[in-house]
Amino acid sequence: GQNIDQPTEMTATEGAIVQINCTYQTSGFNGLFWYQQHAGEAPTFLSYNVLDGLEEKGRFSSFLSRSKGYSYLLLKELQMKDSASYLCAVSHGGATNKLIFGTGTLLAVQP
Amino acid sequence: NAGVMQNPRHLVRRRGQEARLRCSPMKGHSHVYWYRQLPEEGLKFMVYLQKENIIDESGMPKERFSAEFPKEGPSILRIQQVVRGDSAAYFCASSPQGAGGYTFGSGTRLTVV
């Protein structure tokens, strides 16, 4: 089966660092994506990992361990506008390459 | 340089009516995906289409739902005889080669009353 787990909600303080974890068990794997989704809006692409290790992009970094079926998204210097849902998604690969999403982590950044 | 365009943004239908959701992919993209997001749930894959072909419809409910992507014009997701459980946000995404990391549209929020 396909299973992607991430915490439902998290709270953090403006200026701090937060790590959002994601574990997955899928029948296919062609990379892992993180998306940000503000309420009522489209998911927007944040990062893509296909090899083990850390990918850094400004205030956001994402890590992947394929052997452990584990990823995390690290957000530094949190800003109020970072309050959103963060979606972990595995690219299934194969002919379709569809994305399998977790339920998302709702992050609330407090002053 | 428009992104993925979906319309309408909001759609209200009475039970038993038909809903038609439209998606125009980004320029140069010939692969379209439809996802559904139910309240408090994650995005669920529905169907993957290329021009004039349905490639994978494994996520589509067996009845009342259909999708097309004609040679000309937008992709259409059609829901016949809607029921309250169809109320959700429906997102379309497009990509140039069917690779992941595609671009999502802003979605159509369907409310069935």
Image: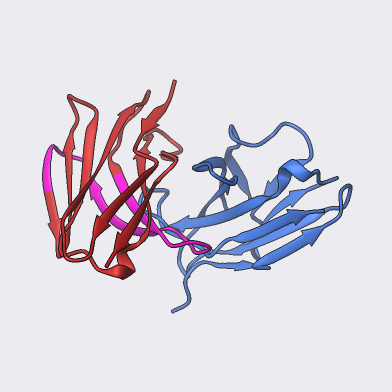
Chain colours: A red, B blue
Horizontal and vertical percent position of residue A87: 38, 48
Is residue B13 shown above or below A62? below
Horizontal and vertical percent position of residue B42: 49, 42
Is residue A28 shown above or below A42? above
Residue A20 seen in the figure: yes
Residue at x 86%, y 48% (from the top left corner): B15
Residue at x 87%, y 52% (from the top left corner): B17
Please, which residue is most extreme toward the bottom here?
B1
Q: Which residues are magenta?
A: A33-54
Please, which residue is most extreme toward the top here?
A1
Left or right of B62 on screen, residue A82: left
Residue A51 part of the magenta segment: yes
Please, which residue is most extreme toward the right here?
B16
Residue at x 37%, y 42% (from the top left corner): A89
Which of the pair A96/A86 is nearer the observer? A86
Which of the pair B52/B78 is nearer the observer? B78
Left or right of B22 on screen, residue A44: left
Residue B15 part of the magenta segment: no
Picture quarter with the N terminus of chain B = bottom left
Residue B71 seen in the figure: no
Which of the pair B65/A21 is nearer the observer? A21
Horizontal and vertical percent position of residue B56: 56, 37
Q: Quadrant of residue A57?
A: bottom left
Residue at x 80%, y 43% (from the top left corner): B83
Is residue A61 shown above or below A4? below
Q: Quadrant of residue A69?
A: top left
Count of numbered tags? 0
Please, which residue is most extreme toward the front here?
A111
Horizontal and vertical percent position of residue A94: 39, 33
